[in-house]
Structure formats: structure tokens, C-alpha cells
Image (cartoon, rainbow, N blue to C red):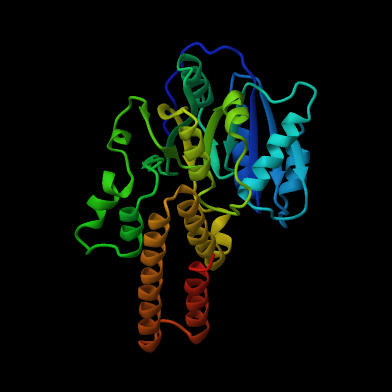
Amino acid sequence: MIKQSPSPPHTPMHTIGIIIVSYNTCALLRDCLASLRSCTLPLQIVVVDNGSRDESVPMVRSAFPEVNLVAHGANVGFAQANNLGFAWFAAQPDGLPPYLLLLNPDTVVHPGALESLVAFLEQHPRVGLVGPRLLNPDGTRQAAAFRFPTLLMTMLDLFPPGEVLPGRIYASWWHGRYPQEQHEAPFAIDHPLGACMLLRRSTLEHVGPLDAHYFMYSEEVEWCWRIRQAGWAIWQVPAARVTHIGGAATSQFRHTMFIALWQSRARFAAQRGPHWHLAAHQAIVRTGMLRLSLKSWWAYLRGHLSHAQLRAHLWAYGEAVKR
């Protein structure tokens, strides 16, 4: 059962520009756009379609005539597609709106959620970006607030501890989580999950758009890193609630997305510096991919993987360490 967002405080009627990047998520996109109609603030929505082969484009045109559509016919990745959305807004007569929301198509925005996010930014002028509380489809809480990646976090991802400890470790500070997510008060974070992020126009003008060199994954991490480095704070506002399905587009190409994940993490490690940190990150990842390769061979020898599956796994592990 989906819980309703608490009633937000009075919010000035500032326009929110919403960018939704879609790729073969027609049914989910329909639900997402429908949920935005409950917002009491003026919205200007643009859907950037990344070359969908389903009915996404005609569905938007027929069912949501108030929504602007940028259908460029190719999958240019999450970061570049959002940047196309920023460019679309900048080219309008009124320019960029005061607030900009990056929203995944596999989300349902609860009534009052956007009002709560805008109200928080209105009350906290040094906060440059906010995220909501994300919920799973069954209404349970989804992790949505994270610390910037550390070498320990990379180690835990690739060398998970025994069967008894993961639940404790993976929900802990050591793996980049915030215990404050168990409570209702807003709190400062390093970065949110990129499924829903609201930022100020002035923040975008200060730090620039997303880095288009990131095709998928870590683009919001790098962007939030720049936002934090520029002196802006980032918070989660639990009063704002958004249901997030998760993985709707990325699950369509599992091995390709696995490679994109680790190559994006390597890019961020290189940008973050220093050199020794990148070298340590690369050593952990190479060792982790070797471990995964050996596990795949063992599964193949035991008859749990076909030869084609083994080749696909080994290819993905090898590509993941290339830069």
C-alpha cells in the first residue's frame, strides 16, 4: 500500500521544470506522468526519449498533450539525455525555470512530494539539491541517501562478507548508508539516488550540467561531488515520498550495464583523485573481477552455466576493468 506524503507547508508558486529520460518504459512512463498531475505547483515537463522501440513516443503525444517531447532517435545515455532536457528549457522564451527536477520514468510521485521539496529549498538557501524518500512498490523504504564512494565500499561490493553479516554491513555507514533514513527529519547527505533530484537553477548555473562522458551510472555521484565542492549542501527530505520501481531500463542489457557501472566508477575515481586512490581502486576491481571470473568457471564446471553464459560473464568482467 502506498503511503501518502504529509501535507507540505505553504509553497510559493514557482515553476518546476521536469526532465524525464525514457527508454522502452512506456507503461511506467504513463504512470509517472499521471502522478505528476496531482502537483499543485506549475509544472513544465519534457520527456527526452532515448530511441525507444516501444510505444513510449506515441503514448506521450496522445495521452499527455501538455508534455513536451524530445525524441532524438538514439540512446545517448542518461547524462547526455538530461543535458538535452536542460538545453530545451534554456532555449525557451522564459529560459530555465527556478527549479529543475530530474525524474526517472519508473517512479510515481506522491501528492505533496514536489511541494515539500520546493518548500525545503525555499527555507534553506544554501541547499542546492534535494532528494525525496524513495519507497519500493510495496511501500517499504528504499535506500536513497549515500556517502561518496570509498575504497572500503568498493571492497564490500566485490568481496561481500559471509552470509550472517551482509544485512548489517550493507545498511551501515561503512557501506555508504545513512542511519537517519530510518527517521522522518530531513538530513544532509553526500548524494541521493538519481531517480529523483530537485535542484535550483542557480545551482545548475554554478556547477554546470551532468558530465556526458558518463553513459550510465555514477553521473549523479560526480554531479553531486561538484555541487558539494562548489559549497552547496545536499539534503534528503523524507516528507517528500516517491515510489521507485528500479532497474526498469538498465535491466534490459544486464552485461552491458554491469560494464557501464564499473567503468563509470573508475572514471569517478580518476576524477576524484589523488593518483594513489585510483590505483588502489583499480587494484581492488581487478582482483574482484578475477574472483568473479573464477566463480563463473566453477559454476560452468558444475553445470550451472552454459558455455555461452560463461563467455558472456568473462567478457563482461574483462571489459569492466578497461578504461
Q: Nearer the viewer, residue 94 or 144?
A: 94
In the depicted structure, whether residue 199 falls above or below residue 7: below
Q: Across the whole image, how many numbered discs are drawn on residues? A: 0
Residue 64 visible in this rendered orientation of the protein: no
Residue that sits furthest to the front in the current view: 275
Instruction: Specify the quadrant of the image occupied by residue 208.
Output: top right
Q: Nearer the viewer, residue 252 or 260?
A: 260
In the depicted structure, whether residue 310 falls above or below residue 102: below
Instruction: Specify the quadrant of the image occupied by residue 294.
Output: bottom left
Q: Residue at x 37, y 82 (%)?
A: 299
Q: Nearer the viewer, residue 260 or 248?
A: 260
Residue 103 visible in this rendered orientation of the protein: yes
Left or right, residue 177 beside residue 306:
left
Left or right, residue 46 beside residue 139:
right
In the depicted structure, whether residue 120 falls above or below residue 277: above
Q: Position of residue 94 (x, y in %)?
A: 76, 21
Quadrant of the image containing the C terminus: bottom right
Q: Position of residue 76 (x, y in %)?
A: 69, 53
Q: Nearer the viewer, residue 47 or 89?
A: 89
Quadrant of the image containing the N terminus: top left
Q: Position of residue 221 (x, y in %)?
A: 48, 44
Q: Residue at x 53, y 25 (%)?
A: 114
